[in-house]
């Protein structure tokens, strides 16, 4: 159920293009503040590094300046103003030694913006709590000699964002904006924190905005626009968009792409061009040159929310507001029910793909060679195995570290961190494979793309099943569901269909799990043994697959590599029963191979 604030925002977005404010930093520079201004009386004797440049601190030491800037943007036509909290987390403020005042920064910033918004009497102004990208990343090592090293953990990032969220909301923010996302894993930690916060508090509208850092069309951590969207589409956001780094000329193709595929409202706030040291303002686009370009975006039907990032001022925002006035807002793209995954690049399970190949040689339980490499700590050669899988055509790679002599969570974390530094491997999605939940969760905290969990089941009852499914959703992953319940593994067709139907209804109806993100494994048991009770195992699997396709909408089926040992026999037997095998084949099976 959406809040009254979100309903009001969505209603406005369906009526017209909304205006976001412009750059806070650019405006602060116009006041030509000095070190003493940043320090004020309170921090006059602050020891250590200079505080000039810590713009977030000005909500405490120069609140009149920040309040005035908000007012100027509102007067220029902004419908949404951002709090001055881009770096108001303990992780970012550690650079200044000011971690202890982070709650106060967020509270004061939100109150200043709220005050400015409430002073406007002719229309509603929404206050967006600005949640920046951090100065530490979960997907990249800053140590070239140790690509698997991380300076922060997922838990630390989520905790820092939780503290920020709590105080932004307490101060009066009525929208949460996770912006300038250059590392999608950082954003996933922010969304995780927001979801956890909403469990015990009223929901607020959430907006996301990524940053394409150069003309390659990728984020700093390497994701394409569609991969970025797939990674974050699990959360019920109001809008997704792009901001910063690029000017309107450079950003144009990526906004067009996003507007064509996003099942959400789309926002954009480009820079006033690429930085230009010869320009008086540092950026080449004036209000008069920027606004017509964005007007064309409105004409094309790409916009729901438009504003400005670095280099823009109230003058730019006024010109933009005038330029897009009267144009219809973009119609939201239809959300199709199909499995969408991502590594650095997107993967969509389209009907024309008959099998999705999952490379399993990066699995210590199935590959003796890989197990020896991991146990010996030879991660360079282990990465070569993963690279070979991708080069050979694996569309997903399965990572499993379940070995008695290993710390599975630590090995999973290290290997996935190393994969993140290898774009020729990390371009494909990952299947995080373990019989231990703590290992699966460790893996989910390392991947910026949309991965697959392998696996969960009803083996330990519905409550644990639901708890794990909710966490998988919160991390933004799909999942394999085994045909296994409290009574054990399904062997007959009747047991397979009963368990899969029960699991599907729990996931879809009770948890709200997207049905297109469910991949059933109806169990392929031993065949061709000569034992009479095994004779129906192959047919039971194929018939269960047919039943799942007919009765559990949008769900998929995973077949282990053992399938192909008996497939020719099974097809022949199945054909004799006059059931068209082709009716269950297209896009139905996720096959594993090469273990």
Image (cartoon, helix red, strand yellow):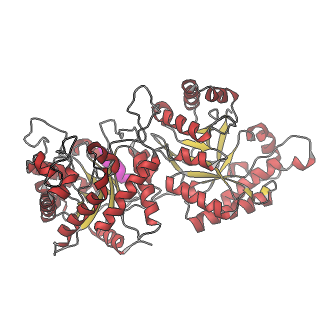
**Residue 319: x and y, percent?**
12, 57
Instruction: Give x and y (percent) for residue 541.
Output: 76, 51
Q: Which residues are magenta?
A: 253-261
Residue 557 in the image: state x and y as whole percent.
66, 51
- Residue found at x 54% / y 56%: 471
Quarter that holds the N terminus: bottom left
Q: Nearer the viewer, residue 362 or 567?
A: 362
Query: In this view of the protein, can residue 128 be seen by the observer?
Result: yes
- Choose between 572 and 445: the one closer to the eye: 445
Q: Is residue 300 above or below residue 416?
A: below
- Tally the numbered discs: 0
Most common SS among magenta residues: helix
Say which quarter of the image contains residue 108.
Answer: bottom left
Q: Nearer the viewer, residue 392 or 23?
A: 23
The C terminus, quarter of image = top right
Is residue 514 a member of the stretch shown in magenta? no
User: Does residue 431 lie above or below 121 as drawn?
Assistant: above
Side of 317 where 232 appears, left or right:
right
Q: Splitting the image into 4 quarters, where does residue 353 fall?
A: top right
Horizontal relation, residue 244 to residue 494: left or right: left
Residue 369 position (above or below residue 115): above
Residue name at image x 15 percent, y 62 percent: 67
- Any part of residue 18 in sight: no
Is 255 magenta? The answer is yes
Residue 390 place in picture, x, y as percent: 55, 32
Taking the spot 59% from the left edge, 60% from the top edge, the residue there is: 467
In this rendering, position of residue 544 left or right of residue 40: right
From the viewer's perspective, is 372 left or right of 322? right
Q: Nearer the viewer, residue 168 or 133?
A: 168
């Amino acid at each position: 159920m959406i809040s009254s604030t979100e309903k009001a925002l969505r209603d406005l977005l369906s009526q017209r293009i909304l205006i976001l404010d412009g750059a806070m930093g650019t405006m602060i520079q116009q006041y030509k503040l000095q070190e003493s201004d940043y320090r004020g009386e309170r921090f006059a004797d602050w020891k250590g590094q200079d505080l000039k440049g810590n713009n977030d601190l000005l909500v405490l030491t120069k609140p009149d300046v920040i309040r005035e800037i908000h007012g100027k943007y509102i007067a220029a036509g902004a419908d949404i103003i951002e709090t001055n909290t881009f770096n108001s987390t303990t992780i970012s403020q550690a650079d200044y030694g000011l971690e202890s005042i982070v709650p106060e920064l967020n509270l004061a910033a939100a109150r200043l913006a709220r005050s400015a918004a409430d002073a406007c009497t002719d229309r509603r102004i929404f206050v967006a709590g600005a949640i920046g990208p951090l100065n530490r990343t979960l997907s990249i090592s800053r140590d070239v000699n140790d690509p698997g090293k991380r300076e922060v953990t997922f838990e630390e990032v989520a905790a820092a964002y939780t503290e920020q969220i709590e105080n932004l909301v307490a101060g009066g923010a009525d929208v949460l904006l996770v912006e300038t996302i250059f590392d999608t894993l950082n954003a996933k930690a922010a969304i995780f924190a927001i979801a956890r916060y909403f469990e015990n508090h009223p929901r607020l509208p959430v907006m996301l905005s990524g940053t394409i850092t150069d003309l390659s069309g990728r984020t700093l951590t390497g994701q394409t626009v569609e991969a970025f969207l797939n990674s974050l589409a699990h959360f019920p956001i109001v809008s997704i968009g792009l901001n910063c780094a690029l000017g309107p000329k450079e950003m144009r193709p990526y906004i067009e792409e996003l507007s064509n595929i996003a099942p959400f409202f789309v926002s954009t706030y480009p820079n006033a061009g690429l930085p230009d040291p010869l320009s008086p303002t540092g950026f080449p686009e004036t209000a008069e040159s920027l606004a017509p370009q964005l007007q064309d975006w409105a004409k094309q039907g790409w916009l729901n929310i438009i504003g400005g990032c670095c280099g823009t001022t109230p003058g730019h925002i006024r010109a933009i507001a005038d330029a897009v006035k009267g144009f219809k807002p973009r119609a939201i793209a239809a959300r199709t029910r199909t499995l969408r995954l991502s590594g650095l690049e997107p993967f969509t399970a389209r009907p024309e793909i008959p099998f999705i190949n999952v490379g399993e040689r990066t699995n210590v339980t199935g590959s003796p060679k890989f197990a020896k490499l991991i146990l010996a700590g030879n991660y360079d050669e282990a990465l070569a195995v993963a690279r070979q899988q991708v080069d050979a055509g694996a569309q997903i790679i399965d990572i499993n570290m379940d070995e008695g002599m290993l710390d599975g969570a630590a090995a999973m974390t290290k290997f996935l961190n190393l994969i993140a530094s290898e774009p020729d491997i990390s371009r494909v999605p990952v299947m995080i494979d373990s019989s231990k939940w703590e290992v699966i969760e460790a893996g989910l905290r390392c991947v910026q793309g949309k991965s697959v969990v392998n696996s969960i089941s009803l083996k330990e009852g519905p409550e644990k099943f639901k708890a794990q499914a909710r966490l998988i959703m919160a991390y933004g992953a799909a999942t394999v569901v085994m045909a296994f319940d409290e009574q054990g593994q399904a062997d007959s067709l009747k047991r397979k269909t009963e368990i899969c139907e029960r699991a599907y209804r729990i996931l879809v109806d009770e948890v709200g799990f997207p049905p297109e993100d469910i991949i059933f494994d109806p169990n392929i048991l031993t065949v061709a043994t000569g034992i009479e009770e095994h004779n129906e195992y192959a047919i039971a699997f194929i018939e269960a697959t047919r039943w799942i396709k007919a009765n559990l909408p949008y769900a998929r089926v995973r077949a282990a590599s053992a399938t192909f040992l008996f497939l020719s026999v099974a097809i022949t037997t199945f054909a004799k029963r006059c059931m068209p095998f082709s009716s269950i084949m297209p896009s139905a099976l996720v096959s594993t191979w090469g273990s």
